[in-house]
């Protein structure tokens, strides 16, 4: 028995992925692991509930969306621009990390994780949230609720929510233009 395949082309972490034969029905999580060796997005629940598997999809208008890879087929990503957790930090020509993204740095400064399993999903969620604030700043009085709403779907079994929340708050408050006074 052979699996039916279909060509898939997309961009992942700013690298064009040439058409590759991918089994129809394969989830994006499996494609990232098996075809691209990108294992940072975690398989948590396998049902799209915990959000540990999320990646960022950049829409044509430049806005960012979170997409759960454990329940979204790889072919849904055809011709899309995807960023996994491996694509957040800046790298030099050799591929070595030279600078973490602002949210990654904030998470380290606030020790926003325990086991770290959920961290890639939180990095993704917080990055999308910061992008939204750059486009549409909110009032300081609304910040706490907005952070809760942005991160609420992400599940941390080690109860690290307070530290993630604090890290995002700290970053938002120190980044000019995200909060209206």
Image (spheres, grey):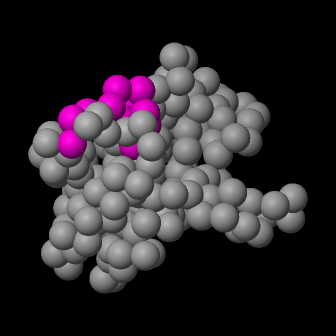
Q: Specify whether residue 179 is in view.
A: yes
x%, y% of residue 171?
A: 39, 57
x%, y% of residue 127?
A: 43, 47
Q: Is residue 179 above or below residue 97?
A: above
Q: Which residues are magenta?
A: 130-140
Q: Is residue 133 located in the magenta-colored stretch of the structure? A: yes
Residue extending farthest to the top is 61
Q: Residue at x 51, y 57 (%)?
A: 102
Q: Is residue 120 located in the magenta-colored stretch of the structure? A: no
Is 4 in front, or is 47?
47
Q: Residue at x 73, y 67 (%)?
A: 98
Residue 103 located left or right of residue 166: right
Is 108 in front, or is 114?
108
Quarter assignment of residue 53: bottom left
Q: Specify whether residue 34 is in view.
A: no
x%, y% of residue 123?
A: 41, 57
Q: Quadrant of the C terminus?
A: top left
Quarter assignment of residue 89: bottom right
Residue 62 located left or right of residue 116: right
Q: Is residue 103 above or below residue 4?
A: below
Quarter assignment of residue 97: bottom right
């Amino acid at each position: 028995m052979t699996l039916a395949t279909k060509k898939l082309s997309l961009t992942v972490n700013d690298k064009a992925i040439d058409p590759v034969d991918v089994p129809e029905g394969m989830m994006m999580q499996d494609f990232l692991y098996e075809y691209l060796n990108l294992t940072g997005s975690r398989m948590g629940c396998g049902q799209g509930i915990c959000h540990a598997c999320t990646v960022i999809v950049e829409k044509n208008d430049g806005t960012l969306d979170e997409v759960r890879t454990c329940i979204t087929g790889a072919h849904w990503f055809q011709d899309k621009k995807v960023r996994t957790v491996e694509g957040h930090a800046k790298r030099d020509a050799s591929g070595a990390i030279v600078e973490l993204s602002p949210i990654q740095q904030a998470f380290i400064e606030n020790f926003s994780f325990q086991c770290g399993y959920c961290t890639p999903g939180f990095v993704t969620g917080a990055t999308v949230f910061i992008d939204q604030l750059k486009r549409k700043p909110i009032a300081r009085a609304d910040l706490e609720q907005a952070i809760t709403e942005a991160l609420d779907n992400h599940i941390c079994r080690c109860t690290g929510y307070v530290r993630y929340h604090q890290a995002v708050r700290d970053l938002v408050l120190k980044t000019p233009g995200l909060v209206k006074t």
